[in-house]
Image: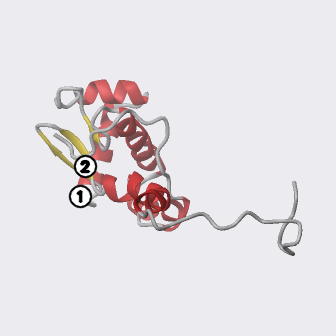
Amino acid sequence: MSPHRTQKRRWFKFYAAESINGSIRYQCTPAERGTWYDLLAFSSLCTNTGTICDREGVPFPLSFIANRLNIRLALLKRTLEVCEQDGRISQDETGIHITNWGKYQSEYDRQKPYRQGKDNPEAKPGPEPTDNDPSYVPF
């Protein structure tokens, strides 16, 4: 089972710089890149985020995935082969695993500033600004 089990996401992080400047730009054809991005989106909707499989951890048939992504099965197979060779995915009896999903999709870092305030009882909000404060700008 994937260590990334969470609720289905309505969004996922997409890194524009890596998409435009990264190795995927020259390692994949435009069709393969589009399929890769669809695989990322699809994996974010699976119960085990970052792993393309059903609720029980059983891989979806490739024909099902191709149909869901509205692509030809040959394109899906080619994309999976390229992505596995490049280390973007791994495949086993539990599904297609997006390599480094947790690193790129982690909620931990996004929520860290909020937790720090809650975890530190000594942390107190600063004083409320007043009209005498030169940095105070009323709304």
Quarter that holds the N terminus: top left
To which residue does mark 1 refer? Answer: 85
Secondary structure of the residue carrying numbered label 1: helix
Where is residue 86? Give x, y as percent. Answer: 28, 61
* In this rendering, position of residue 104 left or right of residue 78: right
Q: Is residue 77 above or below residue 15?
A: above
Which quarter of the figure has residue 2? Answer: top left
Mark 1 Cα-neighbour bin, 10 Å: few <14, some 14–19, many ≥20: few
Which quarter of the figure has residue 37? Answer: top left
Q: Is residue 3 above or below residue 46?
A: below
* In this rendering, position of residue 72 left or right of residue 11: left
Q: Amino acid at mark 2?
A: Glu
Tell me the distance, in whole angstroms, between the alpha carbons under discs 1 and 2. Answer: 6 Å
Q: Is residue 17 above or below residue 70?
A: below
Quarter that holds the C terminus: bottom right
Q: Amino acid at mark 1?
A: Gln
To which residue does mark 2 refer? Answer: 81
